[in-house]
Image (cartoon, rainbow, N blue to C red):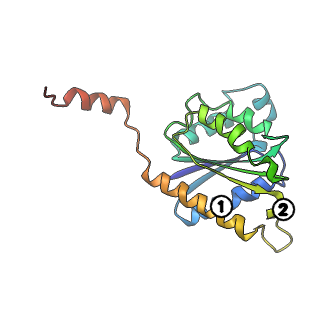
Amino acid sequence: MLVVTLGGSPSERSRSGVLLEHARRWLQQHGVEVVSHQVRDFPAEDLLHARFDSPQVQLLNQQVAEADGLIVATPIYKASFSGALKTLLDLLPERGLQHKVVLPLATGGSIAHMLAVDYALKPVLGALKAQDLLQGVFADDSQIAYADGDQPSRLVPVLQQRLHDALEQFHAALVRRPRPIEPHVLNERLVNARWSI
């Protein structure tokens, strides 16, 4: 199984990035191959000018096309998800998440921003035709501690449990998801099928 993770924070130090890193490690411990991207790793000119031919954008599109699932993590700013992330999602093909399982993750300064996942991020992921769009996890900033010296980053126990529960559901959805049939294979099956009336 292959999962692409996409971090939407333009900052190097990011709580949504910490959440995404915990998810990446959990998936790898469960035998899932993970390819990670951060919006800040893409040249700003490619995003601002919608350069679909950018090598980094093309690589992302190829990896998403090959992936079984996608995890998107974003900070919430002014009741919506990261504008840089929106710009990057706009560079995915129209049906770029078709046949994919998608798990949204978000962080914000207050639980008042929790609904931004449902009302801002999920509609965009749905417009990209995500096959199985899971509930997702919202974390208050106070629930995440950055790495400090020899101390790794930490999640409060209740958040860690919610993240692990969401990842269990994500993993189960990856395992059970139907595999798409290539058009030429489907056509051959239909042509060679025995029909009875």
SS class, disc 2? helix
Q: Which mark is residue 163?
A: 1
User: Count the marks: how many?
Assistant: 2
Residue 160, compared with residue 42, is above or below; it is: below
Callout 1: few (<14), some (14-19), or many (20+) C-alpha neighbours within 10 Å? many
Q: Which mark is residue 142?
A: 2
Nearer the N terminus, badge 1 or badge 2? 2
Q: CA distance from mark 1 to mark 2?
A: 15 Å
Q: Nearer the viewer, residue 161 or 191?
A: 161
SS class, disc 1? helix
The residue positioned farthest toward the left in the image shown = 196
Picture coordinates of residue 174 (x, y %)? 49, 52
Callout 2: few (<14), some (14-19), or many (20+) C-alpha neighbours within 10 Å? few
Mark 1 touches mark 2? (CB < 8 Å): no
In the rendered structure, which amino acid carries the disc numbered 1?
Leu
Among the 4 quarters of the image, the one containing residue 76: top right
Picture coordinates of residue 138 (x, y %)? 72, 53
Q: At 16% from the left edge and 28% from the top edge, which residue is drawn?
A: 195
Q: At 51% from the left edge and 47% from the top edge, which residue is drawn?
A: 68
Image quadrant holding the C terminus, namely top left
Among the 4 quarters of the image, the one containing residue 158: bottom right
In the rendered structure, which amino acid carries the disc numbered 2?
Ser
Picture coordinates of residue 87 (x, y %)? 74, 32
Q: Nearer the viewer, residue 187 or 158?
A: 158
Compared across the picture, whether 193 is left or right of 60 comes to left
Q: Nearer the viewer, residue 122 or 32?
A: 122
Q: At 49% from the left edge and 57% from the top edge, which residue is drawn?
A: 172
